[in-house]
Image (tube, coloured by chain):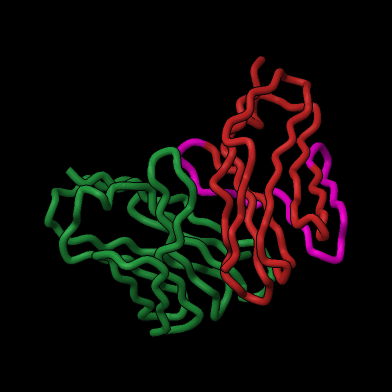
């Protein structure tokens, strides 16, 4: 079955710097890759997603890139702000209602 | 618009007591429904998922069970709680297509 790895497990950046979180997946049939942000004591919230027919997607300060050949995808956050501090999860799915496989999460801390 | 409700928000239960957590979804029909558990500082572990009324699939053997008595209602139960059942329980739904899950706000269960 699918296995999703995520690095780093923790990341600290200065406010205004960029943050990058990388995930790798094992099943080449996976074609949908969402990213979730979980703030303390709350459920994860979808922040951006990408499908395998797209190499990059951007939404304001966040972007996701996908390398299907290498089977990895990354979350990029630019101009980080303290409110970006949270745990971020990546996931992979084969689509069409197939269950997601989540990465173990990255705790991002943005230092003022 | 679709909304997901999960309750209670927090629960403290003694070892050996029963458990019932409820999740309901509004504004959609025939959703895929999921129960996840998140141990402190850990990732998301899929416990159960359901693609329709009465259809439950279990991902992890344990003393928990799930039921889907109505299209938009998903219940997580236990007859006798263990200390190891403590955690943050999340309900989620998806439209059954390759789109991101929407998570509920979670239930923090502490078994004492």
Image quadrant of residue A105?
top right
Q: Nearer the viewer, residue B46 or B30?
A: B46
Q: Is residue A76 above or below residue A112?
A: below
The segment highlighted magenta reads A40-62
Q: Is residue A11 above or below residue B23?
A: above
Name which quarter of the figure residue A38 lies in: top right
| Residue at x-position 26% and y-position 47% | B11
Residue A44 belongs to magenta span: yes
Q: Colour of chain B?
A: green
Q: Which chain is red?
A: A
Horizontal side, residue B14 vs residue B95: left or right: left
Q: Position of residue B12 (x, y in %)?
A: 22, 45
The image quadrant that residue A70 belongs to is bottom right
Residue situated furthest top in the rendering: A112
Quadrant placement of the C terminus of chain B: top left
Taking the spot 67% from the left edge, 57% from the top edge, the residue there is A25
Q: Is residue B48 above or below residue A89?
A: below
Q: B82 or A9: which is nearer to us? A: A9
Residue B52: x and y in percent read 48, 83
In reply to whether residue B19 is colored magenta, the answer given is no
Foreground of the two, B11 or A105? A105
Give left or right: position of B24 versus A47. Answer: left
Side of B23 where B16 appears, left or right: left
Q: Position of residue A69 (x, y in %)?
A: 83, 59
User: Is B14 placed above or below A51 here?
Assistant: above
User: In the image, what residue occupies the spot 79% across and 63% down?
Assistant: A51
The quadrant in which the N terminus of chain B is found is bottom right
Q: Residue B36's spot in the image, x, y percent?
A: 44, 58
């Amino acid at each position: 079955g699918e296995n999703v790895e995520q690095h780093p497990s923790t990341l600290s950046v200065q406010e205004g710097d960029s943050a990058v979180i990388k995930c790798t997946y094992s099943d080449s049939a996976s074609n949908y890759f969402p990213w979730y942000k979980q703030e303390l004591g709350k459920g994860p919230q979808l922040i951006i997603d990408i499908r395998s027919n797209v190499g990059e997607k951007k939404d304001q300060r966040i972007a996701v890139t996908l390398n299907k050949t290498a089977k990895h995808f990354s979350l990029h956050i630019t101009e980080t702000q303290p409110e970006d501090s949270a745990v971020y999860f990546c996931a992979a799915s084969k689509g069409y209602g197939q269950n997601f496989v989540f990465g173990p999460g990255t705790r991002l801390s943005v230092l003022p | 618009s679709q909304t997901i409700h999960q309750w209670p928000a927090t629960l403290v239960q003694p070892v050996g007591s029963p458990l019932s957590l409820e999740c309901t979804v509004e504004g959609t029909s025939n959703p895929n429904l999921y129960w996840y558990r998140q141990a402190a500082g850990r990732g998301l572990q899929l416990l159960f998922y359901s693609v329709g009324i009465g259809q439950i699939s279990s991902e992890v053997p344990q003393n928990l069970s799930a039921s889907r008595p109505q299209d938009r209602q998903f219940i997580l139960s236990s007859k006798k709680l263990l200390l190891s059942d403590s955690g943050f329980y999340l309900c989620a739904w998806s439209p059954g297509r390759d789109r991101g899950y929407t998570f509920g706000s979670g239930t923090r269960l502490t078994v004492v």
